[in-house]
Image (cartoon, grey):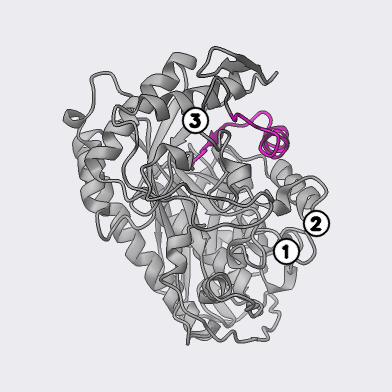
Amino acid sequence: MIQTKVQLLAASVAAIVVLGVGTMRAQAPSEEVKVDWNQTLITSKSTPTLQVVVNPMLLRGAKLHDGAFKALHDLGADYVRYVPWLPYPRQAVAELDPPSDGKTSWDFSHIDTTLDDFMKATEGHSVVLNFSTIPAWMWKTDKPVTYPDDPNQVFWNYTQGTELRDPSMKEVSEYFARLLAWYTKGGFTDEFGKRHESGHHYKVAYWEVLNEIEFEHHWSPEMYTRFYDSVTAAMRKVDPDIKFMAMALAQPSVGSGPEMVEYFLNPAHHKPGTPIDFITYHFYATPGPDQTIDNWQYTFFDQANGFLATTRYIETIRKRYNPSVKTDLNELGVILSEDGKEISTPGYVAKPEPAGYWNLAGSMYAYIYMQTSLMGIDVLGESQLVGYRSQFPSVSEINYETGEPNARYWVLKLLKDNFGPGDKLVETTSSSGDYAVQAFATATGKKLLILNRKNREVDAALPADADGASVTLVAPSTGDGPASTEKVTGHTLKLQPFEVAVVTYR
């Protein structure tokens, strides 16, 4: 989702790989999965979910609108993150010009319809709103920041400046308080005392304070912490019950990331009574431009393991300073270097993702979900509902050609439909380096989550008591369709390339 990552990506050569469709058959693999159902490792806190980033394809009448919002509704996830973001200022900023001569520029006409559709699609479930883009006029810049008149024209240079024009932060805090009031209290009173009616009375459970703060305006730990305290105090006057998420770090392991985590989580750096409910941070696998999918099968999981090491490190900081704070890893995915080349090179059209890519990216997300569930991470957000040519196509959960969900979406739904908080993760061992597996004792029975990390068929030897179990899978054979269900015959499961499967015991 972030533009700064684009600067780290170069052009790549996409490879088309034809994958064979496997079937389950009895064959003796070399490693056997062993499960001790009496040995609980941890009770899960982990909720699988996703983020929705605002872009023109989510507008009413756009090609991807109907399919995307239907998929979102059908998923039925909690903690869905909604981000009106900087490339489209008119769809992300509600006050594009400073108040002057008794008049304001408050305008929600390009913002409300998409948010209304989002709230309808997620009705009955918790949401996280993140209006991450601060009006440009609130920053000190060499000259006023201009932006396109066309609300659908992309503009990557809106977030300029590193110093707010109001050092007290009262101006920007009141901006966010008015945004919250617009959506939860039916409207607000503007800077000159005029009432603006919205008619909205939505329930907003969580508000995330800014996005990728080390990149967007380059916040220091001290400045962001002061900003967080000021904004949340103003917003709590509108809704005392709202909870907050913080930081949304793009690269938590490098640069100012570790310092930001350490500083922000220290209660001594906050005003007394300031709530810190969640910290958030991100991970995208970023393969090199000269790699193909046969390299990616190693790169994605190697980089994921690096991120998991970062997560363990941040967990030690969180537990030391404020163990009641929860964690939402709310952007998890892949950004291919073709995406960056398309954005940075005018007229360039990215090569299509190779066959099998969507299954590989889904398998990586399932792997991160599996491993972070063992750490006690609270929320795992796959990024993102809709991407398309010029807008990070490789992160999409919707096929941007057809408007139907792709394999990444179906993996997310497979996890959401089978696992969640309260499950018991039990002792599970396997010596295989080809697949990963974890047993869960759930409210609906014993289940194994198993995924193939390789771009080839792999045989997995299941425990003897799995004979006769059903297996629900997302694999090359299911294409862009929903998961399919088969029966396990014997103790061997043949996994298709990058398959993600749930084995449900009888």
Residue 337 in percent (x, y) is at: 51, 75
Could you say which is closer to the camera, residue 496 or residue 71?
71
Could you say which is closer to the camera, residue 249 or residue 86?
86
**Nearer-N-terminus badge (1/3):** 3
Specify few, some or many for label 1: CA neighbours under 10 Å numbering under 14, 14-19, or 20 or more. Answer: many
**Nearer-N-terminus badge (2/3):** 2
Q: Is residue 370 left or right of residue 489?
A: left
Identify the residue shown where x is 47% and y is 76%.
434
Amino acid under disc 2: Lys
Residue 391 placement: quadrant: bottom right
Residue 453 in percent (x, y) is at: 50, 73
**Nearer-N-terminus badge (2/1):** 2
The numbered mark at residue 63 is 2
- Above or below 210: residue 142: below
- Give the labeled residue for mark 3: 206
Magenta-tinted stretch:
105-132
